[in-house]
Image (cartoon, rainbow, N blue to C red):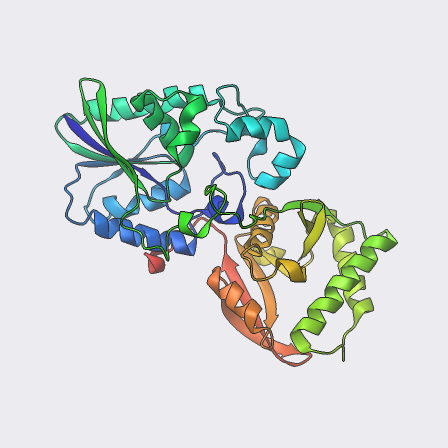
Amino acid sequence: MTTLYLIRHAEAEGNLYRRIHGQYNSLITDNGYRQIAALRDRFADVPIDAVYSSDLFRTMTTARALFVPKGLPLVTRPDLREISMGQWEDYSWAGIDRREHARMALFSATSPDFRAPGGESFPEIRVRGCKAILDIAAQHPGQTVAAFAHGTLIRNTVAEFLGIPSEEMRKMGHSDNTAVTKLEIENGHVTVVYKDDNSHLSEEISTLAKQRWWNKNDQRPDVNFWFDHLDLDTQADRDYYLACRQDAWQTIYGNLDRYDGAGFLDDAYDSWKANPKSLVVAMAGSHRAGLLQLDPRRGQEAHEAYISFLYLAPEQRNNGVGIQLIGKAVSLSRPLDCDKLGLVCSEQNAHALAFYQKYGFHTIGTEAGAYGTLYRMQKDIGYTVREDLM
């Protein structure tokens, strides 16, 4: 008999940014590294003979919790990858739901008829996942193995082993990041000993504990942004941009002394002309909820994408949605070969400083601002394992 621990990857960008990351190669979040450390402790005294992983960064990094301390090689297999979401990859969930609501409803209902354009169906990923697990087990008779994979692949594979059809998977619940499922496999027969166990995670570092979308009993609104572009050749959008800038200045400094709206607008217009995609508005349903401005003229030689302005409407503040704007910045910047995000933040803006520090920005210098010091901050978005956080 083979004992196989099937483990979901740690919290990754898609989980935090609310973006569709099937086979998109996303990074582990800072909180995800804390989950990896907890997983390592869970398995400290559990003998493991081999470690497998999908060949995506988030699973290979999570697998370090086992293969590094146990001195084992990591074997990667593309057939352990997440479901392919085809043309939907790296779009926001809200944006796709707005554009293709009927097809998204099939996904939410775990319908066997679901398929993202150019992607995989649930029946296809079931076949792929089951074949991969049974093949790994066949190579390790009498041994104990760990396999690191992804939420939708694990859910479909375990459902197949339990005899649960696709359309009934919604009754199974969802697995937390780094949740563990234990399988016993003998002669091709699979026993699910337990599934989706996250007992090694405290509530503080659990991903599901901080999210509401999966909890039907939680009646608080779950805000997911979709993104649209501003057109600064129109007066309405120029007025909206200036209103956001003025509100941000007033909120930070308490007055409009030294506020230069015309200068802000001229700078935004120049960067927008250089790349119209660099100025986006966050939408909550049909309402404008925030603004993200990148400056394509700055930082490119150092592979840095520079955030000139990040703004949330007052009604969206303090409810955990600002990170979706950072996710959009990453999505726009990584294809441009940028491995860092940069910005400046006023010492007067304590709330923003705490927000940026929480989500991986660190201070790299200072400069003079209108009222005191501006901190130059930077966040790594390249494919480097954060050993310091594990």
Q: Which residue is farthest left?
A: 142
Rendered position, 189 above or below 218: above
Question: Taking 348 as reference, is 109 left or right?
Answer: left
The quarter of the rendered structure image containing the C terminus is bottom left
Residue 368 vertical placement versus 379 (above, below): below
The picture quadrant where one finds residue 202 is: bottom left
Asked whether 237 or 381 is in front, the reply is 237
Q: Is 300 displayed left or right of 175 in the figure?
A: right
Q: Position of residue 186 (x, y in %)?
A: 17, 21
**Residue lying at 63% horizontally and 39% vertically, measured from the top left:** 95
Q: Residue furthest right?
A: 235
Q: Residue at x 58, y 57 (%)?
A: 322
Image: 195 above or below 365: above
How many numbered callouts? 0
- In the image, 20 versus 216, the foreground residue is 216
Which percent across, then down, holds residue 184?
A: 19, 28
Residue 200 image point, x, y percent:
27, 50
* Nearest the eye: 57 or 327: 327
Q: Residue at x 66, y 81 (%)?
A: 371
Quarter occupied by the N terminus: top left
| Residue 312 vertical position relative to residue 190 in the rendered view, above or below | below
Q: Residue lying furthest bottom in this view? A: 372
Q: Is residue 57 left or right of residue 235?
A: left
Would you say residue 205 is visible in this rendering?
A: yes
Any part of residue 280 in sight? no
Along the line of sight, which residue is nearer the eye, 130 or 103? 103
